[in-house]
Amino acid sequence: MEYVFKKIIEIENRAKEIYQEAVAEKEQMKDALVLEITKREDNIRKMRQGKIDQLSSSGQKGVDEKLALINLQIQEKLSQLETEASTNAKKWEETIFSRVIGD
């Protein structure tokens, strides 16, 4: 009987370890995802500033309209990236849990 209790405790402890590993890996992936989003946002902002500088220096008519269009495209791209990141985060989380648990 003592053996059975000992085995149950071992199984419970291993389950806790697996869960903690999964949570830690989820956090690491979340941090990596946030970092990737930040990098992409920075790149997009740099590209936007480059376009703004280009349009400002060229003196073309309709600069305001072009800037508004660029800003709209950037906002759409950022929204798309956030949606994609959120979707992938869920998939990655499920994959990690499946691998750790062994399903």
Image: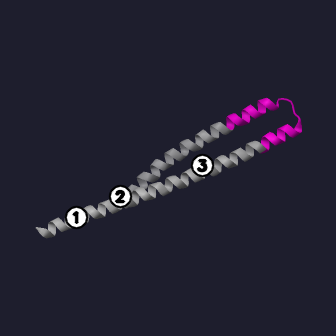
Badge 3 density bin: few <14, some 14–19, many ≥20, Cα 10 Å = some
| Residue 97 x, y percent position in the rendering | 39, 56
Residue name at image x 50 percent, y 55 percent = 29
Q: Quadrant of the N terminus?
A: bottom left
Magenta segment, which residues? 50-73
| Residue 63 x, y percent position in the rendering | 82, 32
Q: Eyeballing the image, is 62 above or below 16?
A: above
Q: Name the residue that disc number 2 marks.
A: 19
Q: Find the distance from the CA under tag 3 to the CA under tag 2.
A: 27 Å
Badge 1 density bin: few <14, some 14–19, many ≥20, Cα 10 Å = few
Can residue 58 be found in the magenta stretch? yes
Q: Say which label, 3 or 1, has the lower sequence index.
A: 1
**6 displayed left or right of 85:** left
Q: Quadrant of the C terminus?
A: bottom left
> Furthest-bottom residue in view?
3
**Label 1 element class:** helix
